Amino acid sequence: MNPELHLVHASWQEHRAALGAVRRAVFIEEQQVPAALEWDGQDESCYHVLVTDAGNRPVGTGRMKPDGHIGRMAVLKECRGQGIGSAMLSALLDIARQQQWPEVYLHAQVAAIPFYEKHGFTANGEQFMDAGIPHRNMVRRLASPDH
């Protein structure tokens, strides 16, 4: 990731505006996800990561629910291809390891499956539609602390 970018573990209470700005731009505006589906009321209980640029502009975000479900991974269109998504996913996986969870899972947009496969996720199950976008379930086992 570009050294001018900064990743933080964020809280919904403190970073709501920044986290929401990225998700609004990517999911609601770019991908046409209905706002009622995007704002599911679960953010307060999630772990969040936030990436900002040198000017402190939010450019990427992701979250993980307390059950190990990673989601809402979003990077502004003009900032993709700089390693932001990989850095955010790594940070979320680190949190899952700290929680000693045996695995994490996500619902990947079909176009993003190769990205998640590069990070050790395996697709399983049939393709399904979510917010009008094709998805697949993916899972990643985490190493146990004694291995």
Image (tube, helix red, strand yellow):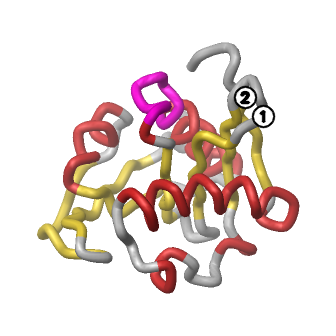
Whether residue 90 appears in magenta in the rendering, the answer is no
Q: Closer to the camera, 60 or 95?
A: 60
For the residue carrying disc 1, how many other residues have a C-alpha within 10 Å: few (<14), some (14-19), or many (20+)?
Answer: few
Distance in Å between CA atoms under marks 2 and 1:
8 Å
x then y, percent, for residue 132: 24, 75
Indicate which disc residue 6 carries.
Answer: 2
* Image: 13 above or below 34: above
For the residue carrying disc 2, how many other residues have a C-alpha within 10 Å: few (<14), some (14-19), or many (20+)?
Answer: some
Which kind of residue does numbered mark 2 sit on?
Answer: His
Residue at the image position 55 percent from the left and 36 percent from the top: 90
Which part of the image, by quadrant, shows the N terminus?
A: top right
Which residue is the site of mark 1?
A: 56
x then y, percent, for residue 51: 66, 38
Residue at the image position 38 percent from the left and 72 percent from the top: 33
Mark 1 residue element? loop
x then y, percent, for residue 54: 74, 23
Which kind of residue does numbered mark 1 sit on?
Answer: Asn
* Image: 61 above or below 21: above
- Residue range in magenta is 78-85
Q: In this view, does 6 lie to the left or right of 71?
A: right
x then y, percent, for residue 80: 43, 32
Which mark is first along the chain, 1 or 2? 2
Indicate which disc residue 10 carries.
Answer: none
Residue 12 placement: quadrant: bottom right
Q: Residue furthest right?
A: 14
